[in-house]
Image (cartoon, rainbow, N blue to C red):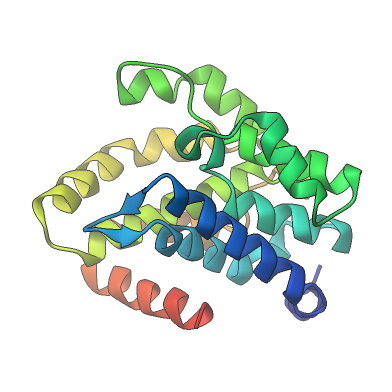
Amino acid sequence: MSKEEFEACLDRQADKIEQIRQSAHNLHQSVNQTYGNGLPYGYHLDMVVAGIREFGHLVCCDENDVLPLMFGGYYHDSIEDARLTYNDVKKQALQMMTEEQALLAAEIAYALTNDKGRTRAERAGEAYYQGIRETPYAPFVKLCDRLANVTFSCSETDDSNARMKLIYKREMPHFLSAINTHSDDPRLQLPHETMLRLAEVLIDDMEKGEKLLELWQQGNG
């Protein structure tokens, strides 16, 4: 799908996408979840979806997949952090799209839900990454999620973000390998090597991190 075609799809579905956005923001607010230094968690969700808006044309195969893709971005933490079940997510999606679309949307959110574990490594083990690799659009949404987190960590200066920046830097080679399906199916692919290089470069370049954050914020203005 060309970028122009993808953007036209986003425009046609703008009302439903905004409905999805508001419901996701309200969901995380209802469990008092914040991001960074007390920001609303919707700030992170908007950053993730900004990446989807920017690069989604490189993976999206059909207009019918646009709403599930956007829903997956906004609801990617809904099971892990906002206490929803898989069926809760699917029911929420059904309010805004067809049953087939809702199934895809719920599968994306489910695939991006960490496993149970005492450590970061246990919560994101091989079974977790296998689920991402096998779910259409999940590798792409996960990459947008990681880019959003890396960008934020590179753009803030407190100790917590400095620590996460080091963690992301250490994890990046394994992370990119773990979500890369090497598939011929565009829905399972990581789009364009430029986006992959961006994930690696951001950690070492604060200025680029700040510029990307500004770009994504403008995209959601």
For this rendering, which residue is in front, 194 or 34? 34
Judge from the rendering whether residue 16 lies leftward or rightward of residue 53; answer left or right. Answer: right
For this rendering, which residue is in front, 72 or 193? 72
Q: Residue at x 46, y 83 (%)?
A: 218
Where is residue 55 drawn, in percent x and y? 62, 66
Would you place residue 176 above or below residue 44 in this image?
Answer: above
Pick out the residue farthest to the left.
159
Q: Quadrant of the N terminus?
A: bottom right
Where is residue 35 drawn, in percent x and y? 32, 54
For this rendering, which residue is in front, 157 or 4? 157
Q: Residue at x 31, y 68 (%)?
A: 209
Would you identify the image quadrant in which residue 10 lies? bottom right
Where is residue 40 drawn, in percent x and y? 36, 61
Whether residue 145 is visible, yes or no, is: yes
Judge from the rendering whether residue 206 lies leftward or rightward of residue 11; answer left or right. Answer: left
Whether residue 136 is visible, yes or no, is: no
For this rendering, which residue is in front, 94 or 10? 94
Q: Residue at x 57, y 55 (%)?
A: 24
Q: How many marks?
A: 0
Judge from the rendering whether residue 21 lies leftward or rightward of residue 102; answer left or right. Answer: left
Pick out the residue farthest to the front.
30
Where is residue 74 drawn, in percent x and y? 58, 55
Would you identify the image quadrant in which residue 110 lies? top right
Q: Residue at x 62, y 32 (%)?
A: 111
